[in-house]
Image: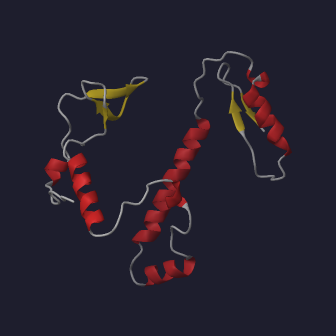
């Protein structure tokens, strides 16, 4: 298989397609944009797409393959054990420790933000009689005392914790 160019300048990898229409949702500019034909383009994809193809071909030519970037990456150990971290710290390699704290902090902060966001709805029926409310309240019999669900009414903003 033809591998193609494998080395690129950073400036090449940072190039966007010309004339992208910004991707705007509820007034907020978000990731990427759209070509004139409506095709979504991630940011800085003008050269990156051909670079990814070339790098993938080179990897496969060497007998390897690209691994899936899915939830399987979140299984198993992702951080050093306590004993491994002691060895790292003892040898002046504390960056993994601080990176782990930073990553955990970002995930926790994003989770807290999501828990506080009121999701929009076009359904105006009473929130306590909705199927969502009934399924949440029917789960109250759960044996775990640490499980709690926060429900926010889309119409009144009232909060109920189950």
Report the residue at 41% width, 60% height from top. 67
Report the residue at 55% width, 76% height from top. 81
Report the residue at 58% width, 33% height from top. 117
Residue 112 position in % (x across, y down): 58, 44
Residue 69 position in % (x across, y down): 44, 55
| Left or right of residue 6: residue 22 | right
Q: Which of 62 and 141 is in front in this view?
A: 62
Q: Quadrant of residue 59?
A: bottom left
Q: In which quarter of the image is residue 137?
A: top right
Report the residue at 73% width, 23% height from top. 127
| Left or right of residue 26: residue 13 | left
Residue 123 position in % (x across, y down): 65, 17
Task: Name the colouring of the figure.
Answer: secondary structure
Q: Most extreme residue toward the front, as rendered? A: 1
Q: In this view, does 138 lie above or below 98?
A: above
Q: Tag count in the figure?
A: 0
Q: In this view, does 127 lie above or below 116?
A: above
Residue 139 position in % (x across, y down): 80, 41
Q: Most extreme residue toward the top, as rendered? A: 124
| Left or right of residue 88: residue 15 | left
Quadrant where the N terminus lies? bottom left
Q: Nearer the viewer, residue 52 or 32?
A: 52
Q: Quadrant of residue 9?
A: bottom left
Quadrant where the C terminus lies? top right
């Amino acid at each position: 298989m033809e591998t193609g160019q494998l080395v690129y300048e950073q400036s090449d990898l940072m190039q966007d397609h010309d004339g992208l229409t910004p991707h705007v949702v509820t007034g907020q500019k978000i990731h990427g944009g759209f070509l004139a034909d409506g095709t979504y383009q991630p940011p800085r994809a003008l050269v990156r797409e051909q670079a990814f193809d070339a790098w993938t071909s080179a990897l496969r030519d060497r007998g390897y393959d690209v691994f899936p970037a899915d939830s399987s990456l979140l299984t198993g150990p992702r951080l050093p054990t306590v004993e491994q971290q002691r060895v790292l710290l003892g040898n002046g390699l504390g960056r993994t420790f601080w990176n782990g704290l930073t990553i955990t902090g970002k995930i926790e902060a994003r989770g807290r933000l999501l828990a506080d966001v009121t999701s929009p709805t076009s359904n105006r029926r009473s929130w306590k009689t909705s199927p969502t409310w009934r399924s949440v309240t029917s789960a109250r019999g759960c044996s775990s005392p640490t499980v709690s669900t926060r429900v926010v009414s889309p119409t009144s903003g009232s909060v109920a914790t189950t």
